[in-house]
Image: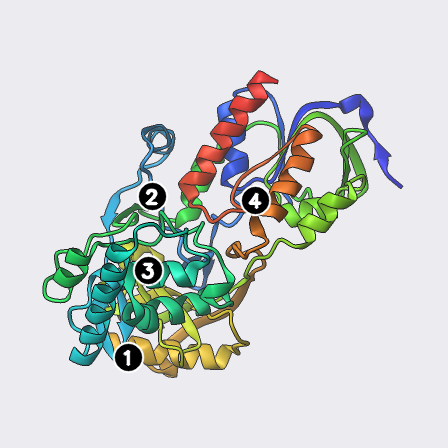
Amino acid sequence: MAQDTQLERHQTIIIGGGLAGISTALHLGEEVLLLEREARLGGLCVSHTSGDYSFDMTGHWLHLRDPRMRDLAEARIALPTTERISSVFSHGRVTDYPFQANLRGLPGSVIAECLTGAVEAHMEGARAEKRQPAADFGEYVLRHFGAGIADHFMFPYNTKLWGVSPSAISHAWCQRFVPVPDLNQIIAGAFTDDNRSMGYNASFHYPEAGGIGAFTAALAADLPGVRTDADVASLHLGERWLELADGERLYFDRLVSTMPLDVLVERWIDAPTAAREAAARLRCTKVDYLDLGLRGEALAGRHWIYLPDPDLSVYRLGCYSNARPSMAPPGGSSLYVELRNDRPVDTEEALDDALAVLSAIGPPVGREDVEVCERRTIPHGYVIYDHDYLAARTTTLKALEARGVISTGRYGKWVYASMEDALLDGRAAASILKEM
């Protein structure tokens, strides 16, 4: 039976203590109640240790382009800038990222196929007087890069990442995240290393110690009105209350939610049928990954590497300790290993493939070098921009907006976004609240 605490009515409640929720509270600058279901704030931006090794929840490399967000962060913690060292491992070769702009080093036949495809795509685009927008991500790739780059990287890598065919998703997510070199750059990248720094993530910020969790902890250090271990089990927007898993009922005037959009609607008692049906159509991947602690060096100093090979069970490896040695004991390496989403992968297969890749790139490593291997799952990983995405998302968000709820953050807005985007989302939510 609910414990009715209506006398403790709150003007503003924020659900979720990840970056978007923390940022909302910081920017609002007034008393709020921030509810976080876990024992600490941070959401996915937390770190943990296993033995002498430290890990994040896979790669959380912070990019701060907005001066306001940089000021917000650097006022609370030192965040040294690191120039990205990332690569692609395919055809038994290591090349620079992004693949489409750095073909140099691949087998000659692969380079020829990729360049031919890029030229053909360019010529076809030049001949077309007017074309309709690409119907899906697969068509977008073929138009911009050609068949060779599509077949050798874009299609196999993105199938492993998203768990669906490139033709099953739109290209709405990729404008910022997929570098699009022009034909001259593609050709130059087959012979020079001029394009090594291409892309939005050419550099990143990261704490000296404590992993990305140190950043989140610094942001949240002075927040009042925080309750952890507070899981929102249900909510009634008409009556303006929510109920926690322990039965406590809290009343509110204004509500900001950073809870995943599909979960929020599941727990919304008086949700209209249209919102329920739309939310049920929202799709995302999970992220299965390994925390891997190894004796010895790994990835030859690289921060992360992409693995498009369709025979490999993993699609990306990253090494925290190559960015900050404090993440591993002396002589050790702290890594994340991300498992493909298009078929089941068991832990042993993933570990074997990861060790094989690491041995091909750097000093050989074997099972005897593994000091930590723990499998973890993030249930909400990457939002899938399928062809029903826009209608389903729009219907769901409009239903919440009509009831005075701001649903924000990566999963609250149901978008593919960065950590900085979550901070900006919080700032925007605070601005809307101030005008209510």
Secondary structure found at label 4: loop
Q: Residues within 10 Å of mark 2 (few under 14, many from 20)?
A: many
Q: Mark 4 and mark 3: span between their CA atoms?
A: 46 Å
- Of 385 and 234, the residue lying toward us: 385
Question: Is residue 11 something that shows in the picture?
Answer: yes
Q: Is residue 194 left or right of residue 270?
A: left
Q: Mark 3 and mark 2: span between their CA atoms?
A: 29 Å
Which residue carries the number 3 mark? 143
Secondary structure found at label 2: loop
Question: Is residue 303 something that shows in the picture?
Answer: no
- Of 244 and 188, the residue lying toward us: 188
Mark closer to the chain start, 1 or 4: 4
Which residue carries the number 4 mark? 40
Q: Quadrant of residue 33?
A: top right
- Of 346 and 381, the residue lying toward us: 381
Which residue carries the number 2 mark? 63
